[in-house]
Image: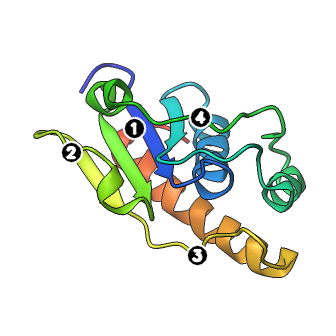
Amino acid sequence: MSDTPIVLFVCVHNAGRSQMAAGYMSALSGGAVEVRSGGSEPGDSLNPTAIAVMAEEGIDISQAVPQLMTTEQVRAADAVITMGCGDACPIFPGKRYEDWELDDPKGRPIDEVRAIRDDIRSRVERLLGELVPDAS
């Protein structure tokens, strides 16, 4: 792993879960982690409810744009965190992979999206603690 670990968060549309995870990792790591996100079938825009619940946490993801996850992003990442992209995510030996089973926030009421957000935050905090033990 390089001095600055690279984490790639991937979900199908790159419009909700992976964007919330990337927002948390960027905010909580204070630059100690290089954060990327992508989707296997990127959507047209971010989920507005995901934007709203992250804003409640003081994290602005409104300028993020769903983008296609590339093989090069996966190859460059130290950790690849998938969230329901199934077999669409390429796997390279020697990488850290985790599949986080999270409900898709698309079309869900805000209270359910808040619960998904809170689950993502606790997972990101754990991952950050493992990748950068001295990060606060």
Q: Residue at x 21, y 45 (%)?
A: 91
Measured Cα–Cα span from mark 4 to mark 2: 19 Å
Quarter-wise, where is residue 5 in the image? top left
Crowdedness near tag 1: few (<14), some (14–19) or many (≥20) residues, C-alpha within 10 Å: some
Q: Quick one: label 4 or label 3, which is nearer the N terminus?
A: 4
Q: Quick one: label 3 or label 2, which is nearer the N terminus?
A: 2
| Tag 3: amino acid | Asp
Secondary structure category for the residue under label 2: loop
Residue 3, compared with residue 85, is above or below; it is: above
| Tag 2: amino acid | Ile
| Tag 4: amino acid | Gln
Measured Cα–Cα span from mark 3 to mark 2: 23 Å
**Disc 2 designates what residue?**
91
* Residue toward you, 86 or 127: 86
Circles 4, 2 touching at the beta carbon (< 8 Å): no
Marker disc for residue 103: 3
| Tag 1: amino acid | Val
Measured Cα–Cα span from mark 1 to mark 4: 26 Å
Quadrant into which the C terminus falls: top right
Where is residue 78 shown, x and y percent of the image?
29, 34
In this image, 127 relative to 3: left or right?
right
Marker disc for residue 132: 1
Secondary structure category for the residue under label 1: loop
Marker disc for residue 67: 4
Crowdedness near tag 3: few (<14), some (14–19) or many (≥20) residues, C-alpha within 10 Å: some
Measured Cα–Cα span from mark 4 to mark 3: 20 Å
Crowdedness near tag 2: few (<14), some (14–19) or many (≥20) residues, C-alpha within 10 Å: some
